[in-house]
Image (cartoon, helix red, strand yellow):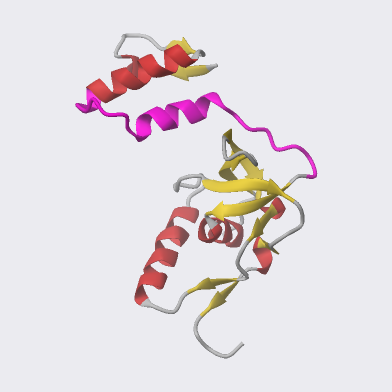
Amino acid sequence: MWRATRAETGEGRPARFGSEADVRLIGKRIRDMLGTGDRTHVDFAIANRMNHFEHPSGALYHILDGVRRAKAAQMLGHADIRAEVIGESGQSLGEGEIPIKVLRSPKTLIRRLTSADETRWSRVLAGAQEDVLSFPPITVQPSRERGTRIEDVGFDFGGDL
């Protein structure tokens, strides 16, 4: 069960939410507070809290989005990173803390050739300097041993290798 805060319920006390109907209700209340009637990222953030993913021992994950975030977290000593796990069907299996050592990257190098590349890297590195990572979850998919271990991902500065 996910516990909503006072700001999320608009009431004077916390409330518990567990069903899909509860999630829709709390999403509507937050949208009303934000002044938008459209479905927003709030709905998806709330829904993801409902689906917690537990990392099974021995599993490996292929990074679909977030190699820079994973590398920055690894370089700054984080053991785990928040990830949304996507199943083979393309559906979310939920979010959870995944050990960085079980992540596999589709790329061997992170590009740092242009000022835009450096800006992206600097922004990610700044987020990884916090005790609690401040960036959004990476996206991963369970996989076999394909890809490069995060600690083996290097940087492309444009020189000869």
Is residue 34 shown in magenta? Answer: yes
Question: x and y percent of residue 42 in the render?
Answer: 36, 30
Q: Which stretch appears magenta?
A: 33-58
Determine whether, in the image, residue 4 is placed left or right of residue 85. left
Quarter of the figure that contains the N terminus:
top right
Measuring 63% from the left and 46% from the top, which residue is drawn there?
A: 141
Q: Is residue 11 magenta?
A: no
The answer to whether 18 is drawn above or below residue 119 in the figure is above
Q: Residue at x 60, y 54 (%)?
A: 63
Observer able to see residue 129? no
Residue 47 image offset from top left, x and y in percent: 47, 26
Where is residue 72 shown, x and y percent of the image?
54, 60
**Residue at point 35%, 22% (across, down):** 27
**Viewer-proximal residue among 90 and 44:** 90
- Left or right: residue 139 versus residue 55 is left
Q: Is residue 126 above or below residue 89?
A: below
Residue at image coords 51%, 27%: 49
Q: Is residue 31 left or right of residue 139?
A: left
Hey, which quadrant is residue 35 in on the image? top left
